[in-house]
Image (spheres, helix red, strand yellow):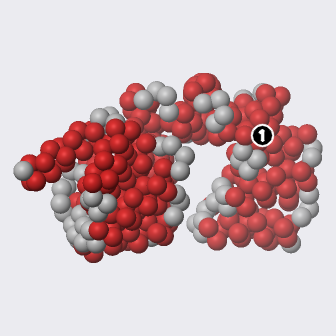
Amino acid sequence: PIVIRRQAREAEARALLEASNWEVMLKAAGELLAEDPGDRLGHAMRGHAYLHRGQPGDPERARDAYSEGMKHAPNAYLFPHQRGLARSQLGDAEGALADHGLALSLQSDYVPALLARSRLLNARGDHAGALRDAEAGLLGGANNVPLLDEQSRALVGLGREREAIAILDRAIQLAPQRPLLHFRRGFIRGEAGDAEGAIADFTREIAVNPELPGAYVQRGRHLLDTRKDGAGARADFDRAIAVQPGFAMAWANRSRARLLAGDTANAEKDARHALTLDPGDPVAKHTLAGLADIRGSSSEAVALLEDVLTTLPGVTEARLQQIGILMRLGRDEDALRSTRAGLALAPGNLDLLDVEAAALLRL
């Protein structure tokens, strides 16, 4: 009878979890713990309910419920893993990593803990560690799409973009309706110089979910820069703003598109609005630098471009624009310093090499 009762309660807990019925689960957990304060199922149910319910203070309650469960079941790997998830919600990445590590010390092939730790390691920049965990998890099932996603992120972090794209190809075959996979592949392709492949991926992402503003912005950037399709780019930026009016990146990129089209008044309006949403937005500052240069405010343009390059030192277009203004102002030594800073990041850039030669001749 005890076994039958336990099986019935476990079945009830699974049903409540699948139904996302957190209030009933909390009540059932309370009843179990009233009967036996050491009941592992009761602590697990309470922790799960708090972890998923989403009310203020729930992550702390979930963490504490799992901690209590660990006291009564120190060898159960589920409790430290779940506590790690609660700690992640609280922003305690180090504590979460320690908890997932404890869970894996108890059950080394526990895939959810490997996935969670891989995700955390990618976030902190330990891509080699993230890759190890992702690959270890995939030994238990090669078609685990979240693990394939983390594996691709780790590979990108390690500079192995082609391998990352191949992994995402496989993930997309398994889960073509996951828009984030298309976004990741499109972003990697764009960074690798495959603008047409990136446009195709962002277009697929939009087809899966047309309410994701980032996809419109990324596609619009490639339409503007590669295809020189200003009208198509502006339409994408317009759509991103319609989906999410507070998305600074969309306003900033539309300002750039308008500047390139000669619509300086609206370009400035968009750029300034972007900066009210995100005061550090580099694209908006780049647009304002171009507008300042058009007005003849060269010193203002140089300062704005310096802000851009402080945030994104590898943006060659902004660096070349700054160098050109500095040379026009007769500030050849400053131009040479900026040129060499750019070459430190891109040693083979022919435009920067040409500018360096010109600056040296002037000096």
Q: On the picture, is 12 further left or further right than 234?
A: left
Residue drawn at x 18%, y 56% as measured from the top left: 141
Q: On the picture, is 116 further left or further right than 215?
A: left
Q: Quadrant of residue 309?
A: bottom right
Q: Position of residue 148 (x, y in %)?
A: 30, 54
Q: Position of residue 191 (x, y in %)?
A: 50, 52
**Residue beneath disc 1:** 276
Q: How many marks?
A: 1
Looking at the rendered structure, the secondary structure element under dot 1 is: helix
Q: On the picture, is 235 further left or further right than 302?
A: left
Residue drawn at x 21%, y 41% as measured from the top left: 12
Residue drawn at x 89%, y 64% as measured from the top left: 331
Q: Residues within 10 Å of mark 1 (few under 14, many from 20)?
A: few
Q: Position of residue 59 (x, y in %)?
A: 48, 53
- Examine the rendered structure and indicate whether residue 243 appears above or below residue 311: above
Q: Quadrant of residue 217?
A: top right
